[in-house]
Structure formats: C-alpha cells, structure tokens
Image: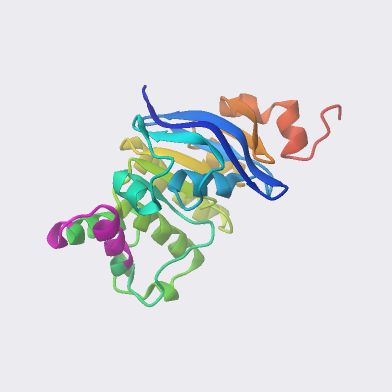
Amino acid sequence: MSALLSVSELQKSFGAVVVADASSFDVAQGEAVGILGPNGAGKTSLFNLITGSLRPDGGAIRFEGRDITSASAAARCKMGVARSFQIPQPFVGMTVFENALVGATQGAGLPAAEAEAHALDVLHETGLFAKANMRAGSLSLLERKRLELARALAAKPKLLLLDEIAGGLTDAECGALIDTIKRIHAKGTTIIWIEHVVHALMAVVERLIVIDFGRKIAEGEPKAIMESAEVKEIYLGIAADG
C-alpha cells in the first residue's frame, strides 16, 4: 500500500514544552492507525499539525505525495483531511442535519442538492437520522460524539482523524460507536485514532504508535506494542522491572 500521509521529522515547541520531537511516520491508504500516550504527550497537537491549525517549527507533512506543510486548514480539508474533536464542538443553535450539511458544503464542496443527499446518508451511517431536525445543543454526549463523526464524514475525507471519540461513553455506547467506525473503515476510509479507551482502539486499528513528550517511543502491531515493557512503564505507569 502506498503512503497516504507522510510525517517527517516534525518539530513543534511552545517555549520549553515540546509537543513534537522529530516525529516521523507514514500512514498507508486504507489503514487504521491508533495513537496512544499519556496526557500531555502531544497527541492532539500532532492532529493540529496534520490538519493545519498549528504550524510546525520544522519537518514536513505530505498528503498523497504533495507537500502540505504550509497549506491552510481549509485547504487540507478540501484535499480530504477531516477530524473530530475531543470535546464535541457542534453548532449548537443549528439542527443535526444543518451541522452535517456544513461539512458537505464547506468541507466536501458539494452543490446544494448533492450536499443535502450526502448529509442525510451520513446521518444514516452514524445513527443520527432520527435526530436530523433536533437542535445539536439538545443532544446527549453519545449523540454529540456521533455528530462530530458525522460532520467529519460529511466532508468526504480520505483521511479521518478521531480524537478520543470514545471518551466518557458507557461500555454499550462505546461498543456501538466501535461498530460504526468499523463500518466506515471497511468502506476504505483511512483512519488515525487517538484514544485512551484502549480496548476500543484494539478492536479497530492495525497498528499502534505510542508517543511521550512529543517523541515516538514505539510503533507496531497492537498486541505486541501493549505488551512492551517500555509502553507499560510510560503509558500505563507500570515499572519495567516490576
């Protein structure tokens, strides 16, 4: 598989705080990659760098072979890079359908009739069709998480970035969300998923990357990574000689 996304020697600091320390990795077309790390490791900053809302101090980002390091967030979205946010950020005064429609028109750039049809398809996909005419501000946490996913999908992403989308959900809610993400991935969408709910990641991703203080400390097959002594010590707080 060819690389859809290539991150090379990415550097970003805020004073003495390093959020990306020579980060390098590739994500293949159609792959699902999980990213783990303790709070403050630089995971969300990495997403901000990939999506263009944060500019790196050094290094390069390539998407479909094109250098997008200097491209705006809006331009990257139109190229096919979309994301959800850790804290759902719906347009609370708009309906669920209108939120999805924003993604279809502004992200995917679809004309009106096509955008409306696509937005409705996405609401079916994410289990929100019955809530289409409800105000986004009235949704439950699970429904807001699904709306984050729907709005990102409405932009027709080639690369979908999910930021702790399972956080705060019950086991049943998490299971339902995992099933939805599996269906999306099975249709060929490339996914990078940041998550603290490890069992959710393990159910979907084919590869794990672990970062700490902006530095990649491990990468590989999920089960092997979770059994690594270094990962247990840094991420789980279990001493390597314990």
Q: Position of residue 138 (x, y in %)?
A: 43, 76
Q: Position of residue 144 (x, y in %)?
A: 45, 64
Judged left or right of residue 176, residue 1 is: left
Asked if residue 105 lies in the magenta stretch, the reply is yes
Magenta stretch, residue numbers: 99-114
Q: Which residue is most to the left?
A: 113
Residue 218 position (above or below residue 152): above
Is residue 126 magenta-colored?
no
Is residue 207 visible from the viewing direction of this image? no
Q: Residue furthest right?
A: 242
Which quarter of the rendering shows the N terminus? Answer: top left
Identified at 38% across, 45% down, the residue is: 71
Q: Is residue 16 above or below residue 206?
A: below
Q: Quadrant of the C terminus?
A: top right
The total number of labels drawn is 0
> To which quarter of the image does residue 215 belong?
top right
Residue at the spot x=34%, y=62% of the render?
Answer: 128
Image position of 229 (left or right of 216) = right
Residue 65 in picture, x, y percent from top left: 35, 29
Coloring scheme of the render? rainbow
Q: Residue at x 75, y 37 (%)?
A: 234
Could you tell me if residue 85 is visible in this image?
A: yes
Dominant secondary structure of the residues highlighted in magenta in the image: helix
Viewed as shown, does residue 62 lie left or right of 40?
A: left
Q: Where is residue 16 drawn, in percent x and y?
A: 73, 47
Please name the residue shown 55% across and 30% down the image: 24
